[in-house]
Image (cartoon, rainbow, N blue to C red):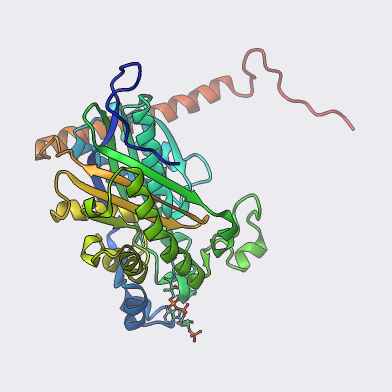
Amino acid sequence: MEMKRRPTTNSRNAVQRYAHICGWGTSVPERVLTNHELARMVDTNDEWIVARTGISQRYIANGRETTASLGTAAAREALDIADVTPDDIDLIIVATSTPEHHFPSTASLVQDALGARNAGAFDMLAACTGFVYALSIAAQAIQAGAMNTVLVIGAETLSKIVNWEDRGTCVLFGDGAGAVVLQGSDSPGGVLASLLRSDGSGGDLLKVPAGGSAMPASYETLRDNLHTIHMNGREVFRFATRVMADACRDVVAAAGLTMDDVDVIVPHQANKRIIEAAARGLRLPIDRFAINLDRYGNTSTASIPIALCEAVSEGRIRPNDNLVLVAFGGGLTWGATVVTWDVTPKATVTGLHKMRRQALYSVARMRSIVRRGARAIEGTIWGAQAPDGIEPPHREKD
Ligand code: COA
């Protein structure tokens, strides 16, 4: 799927809409797990992990920290910065590989926690490429004029699906969430172009084999650890180094730019050596890339928004910078987006500002409790009575 930069008006003279990032936020669990601690759990050591991956530590969720709670916290921060209220949101997309359930979607849980009464909500499953996919879909909904405000979240609790006895995978992943608010505007800029790709023939290289309809949960699947991440590390490494540079080059061309116009590349934070290979492939200095995987590990869909937020808060990303966000992951999937960072935060987040928003979220929580209560009472009153005009199903006698 590719979007080219278009003229500011179309043939009917309607105003072209652009999708700008106007808010951003992150949330990570409290608990940090260092390489040294991991070395006491499996046969590994800090030197190996740092040399082969660049990772020194990662955040791990406790029982109360879930994909939805981390996603909600990141979203609240992003809404604060954008100065957007939950009622303004038209759509919430949560990109995640670790949803709370098959359904309801994690996005619907976030919608309820925020009290976003006017929003649609769905999850996006494209493994670690999910955030780039979601951002692209959100931008297109805005550019088409169908939506004005879309909340895009990447949120993960990968620690819950990692096999903590497999040193080949458990050293790589971490938990966390990042979010951005996209809003429509008539001024050119924002998300300029996207490229989304998939090669399902490589699906077996990175997968959670059981728990879906192909292999429902059973005693055997639990015994054989088939609900955890299974990965062919070397093959995924080869695939990632092949696609990263090409995706960057192609999406930058689709945006009508050259690599010289790109100020910062925010790559998926899987492995420092993969990012270094992409830098070599693009003949760019490594300092053109925002890298923070040493402190977070691979947080899948959350890795790009977390790295983006850090780069903004460190002043690495400045107004009018051109960014490339580029990701790869299970599926196999890969994708990239070009964004012009041209919107300065609307709101200075003060204590009063935060208190007002906190009150909104408390009202949302109360509203949700009242709704659940009302539904329970309704269920008790109406009991087994079928809705008007619908006969209860009956079984034929044998
Ligand atoms: N600690 C110590 N040794 C380890 C280890 C660990 N955590 N994990 C693997 N090893 C060992 C292997 O058993 C192997 O030993 P052997 O030579 O005796 O068989 C040796 O280290 C080399 O293994 P190899 O798999 O070739 O290492 P590598 O350099 O390819 O690094 C990965 C392994 C997983 C770090 C690397 O392949 C990788 O990052 N792949 C991409 C994974 C990824 O990004 N996945 C997410 C995609 S979104």
Picture quadrant of ligand 1:
bottom left
Q: Quadrant of the N terminus?
A: top left
Residue at 29 percent of width and 65 percent of height? 283
Of residues 95 and 136, the one nearer the viewer is: 136
Residue 295 appears in the figure: yes
Residue at 38 percent of width and 46 percent of height? 68
Number of callouts = 0
Taking the image as shown, residue 232 lies to the left or right of residue 281, namely: right
Image vertical order of residue 39 relative to residue 174, above or below: below
Image vertical order of residue 115 relative to residue 31, above or below: above
Which residue is farthest right?
398
Q: Quadrant of the C terminus?
A: top right
Of residues 339 and 391, the one nearer the viewer is: 339
Taking the image as shown, residue 200 lies to the left or right of residue 265, namely: right
Indicate the quadrant where residue 284 lies. bottom left
| x then y, percent, for residue 76 | 25, 40
Taking the image as shown, residue 71 lies to the left or right of residue 201, namely: left
| x then y, percent, for residue 246 | 40, 57
Residue at 80 percent of width and 29 percent of height? 395
Image vertical order of residue 210 relative to residue 12, above or below: below
Image vertical order of residue 341 relative to residue 111, above or below: below
Indicate the quadrant where residue 140 lies. top left
Residue 65 appears in the figure: no
| x then y, percent, for residue 339 | 27, 44
